[in-house]
């Protein structure tokens, strides 16, 4: 095992896949220079290793970056492009939602359209509301796109390699804070299947479903609750689309209680989809109503104290889970 941040794990996956397959190239704002001169960032050193034909710095135009990806995929390449901040997905949405997501369907399944769109997301860096909002539910609502949100460096590497090898468009969403959080990563070439959740911690009393950065709060809360005799099972989705329904339902049928935790705002958040799934397919197994812990329905604050208040945390989890047993 090696200790890498999520950004370094992504960097390793990109380097290995670009070495393995000459059709893979990367593009985006500053992927060769600028902020990626930081060795913790995802594309650090790739320009020097692979050259400007395969590491392309683009103009500041998310629509152009997404259009480049679609066109390159149509012509047989395997682009991996970066949208620097999740809210800027809205600018690229026409190319991604109306073209990338639809082309394989429109070909009757006869053509393949491999492309990966890496998107940075998440609050916690004081970047303000126009850079920090989590919009994974928007992407998941568009048929034809796979949506991946890893919460550990090891998962990020294995899932990104699978995404690059996939024959369909994959939206790969990376939390910005996790770019600087180290974790163990297996050495060598390995992949993790898209669409398979991971039971990060077995438990018997409560199922806690989460993904991305909120995995950290889940572990903290589970550790504190264990001291009070409450056993929490942590289900890390890793992939939102396709959703591992079996993993969620199996866990809920065991524990009888479900909490869904995500950083995105509550209304229209992906947590509602999970709650609906359990209500439809495991309602008779529930011992209590499903609970959702999310950010409030407001823009992400710029002020650090307000941003901290905005973010769901382990105290919210502990209070909610304890409420099941009062």
Image (tube, rainbow, N blue to C red):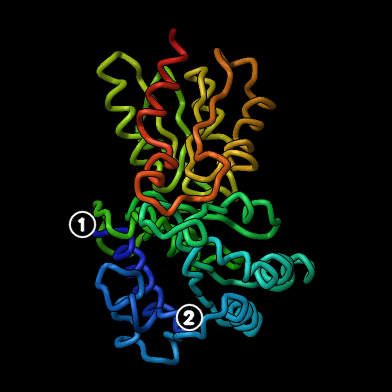
What residue sits right under mark 2 in the picture? Answer: 27
Q: Is residue 105 above or below residue 62?
A: above
Q: Is residue 61 left or right of residue 182?
A: right
User: Residue visible at 46% across and 50% down?
Assistant: 301
Q: Are marks 1 and 2 in contact (CB under 8 Å)?
A: no
Front tag of 1 and 2: 2
User: Residue visible at 44% across and 92% down?
Assistant: 53
First in sequence: mark 1 vs mark 2: 1
Q: Specify the quadrant of the image occupied by residue 217.
A: top left
Q: Mark 2 packing: few (<14 Cα in 10 Å), some, or many (20+)?
A: many
Secondary structure under tag 2 reads strand
What residue sits right under mark 1 in the picture? Answer: 3
Please state the horizontal and vertical placement of residue 265, each as a whole percent of the image: 55, 43
User: Residue visible at 48% across and 58% down?
Assistant: 173
Q: Is residue 291 above or below residue 93?
A: above
Please state the horizontal and vertical placement of residue 76, each as a whole percent of the image: 60, 82
Please state the horizontal and vertical placement of residue 318, each as a whole percent of the image: 37, 24
Q: Specify the quadrant of the image occupied by residue 282.
A: top right
Secondary structure under tag 1 reads strand
Query: Looking at the rendering, in which quadrant would you find the C terminus?
Result: top left
Q: Is residue 123 left or right of residue 130?
A: left
Q: Mark 1 packing: few (<14 Cα in 10 Å), some, or many (20+)?
A: some
């Amino acid at each position: 095992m090696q200790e890498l941040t999520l950004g370094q794990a992504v960097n390793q996956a990109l380097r290995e896949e670009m070495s393995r397959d000459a059709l893979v190239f990367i593009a985006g704002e500053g992927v060769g220079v600028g902020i990626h001169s930081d060795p913790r960032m995802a594309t650090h050193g790739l320009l020097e290793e692979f050259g400007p034909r395969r590491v392309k710095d683009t103009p500041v135009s998310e629509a152009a970056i997404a259009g480049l990806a679609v066109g390159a995929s149509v012509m047989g390449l395997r682009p991996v492009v970066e949208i620097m901040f999740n809210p800027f997905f809205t600018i690229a949405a026409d190319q991604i939602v109306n073209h990338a997501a639809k082309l394989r369907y429109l070909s009757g399944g006869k053509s393949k359209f491999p492309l990966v769109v890496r998107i940075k997301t998440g609050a916690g860096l004081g970047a303000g509301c126009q850079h920090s909002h989590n919009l994974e539910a928007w992407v998941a609502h568009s048929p034809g796109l796979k949506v991946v949100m890893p919460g550990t460096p090891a998962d990020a590497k294995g899932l990104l390699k699978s995404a690059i090898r996939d024959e369909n468009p994959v939206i790969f969403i990376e939390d910005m804070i996790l770019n600087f959080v180290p974790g163990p990563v297996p050495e060598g070439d390995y992949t993790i299947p898209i669409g398979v959740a991971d039971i990060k911690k077995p438990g018997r009393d409560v199922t806690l479903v989460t993904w991305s950065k909120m995995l950290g709060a889940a572990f903290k809360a589970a550790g504190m609750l264990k001291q009070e005799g409450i056993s929490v099972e942590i289900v890390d989705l890793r992939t939102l689309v396709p959703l591992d329904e079996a993993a969620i339902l199996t866990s809920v049928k065991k524990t009888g209680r479900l909490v869904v935790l995500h950083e995105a705002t509550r209304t229209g958040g992906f947590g509602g989809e999970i709650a609906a799934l359990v209500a439809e397919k495991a309602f008779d197994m529930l011992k209590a109503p499903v609970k959702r812990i999310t950010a409030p329905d407001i823009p992400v604050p710029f002020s650090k104290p307000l941003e901290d208040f905005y973010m769901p945390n382990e105290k919210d989890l502990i209070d909610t889970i304890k409420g099941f047993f009062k």
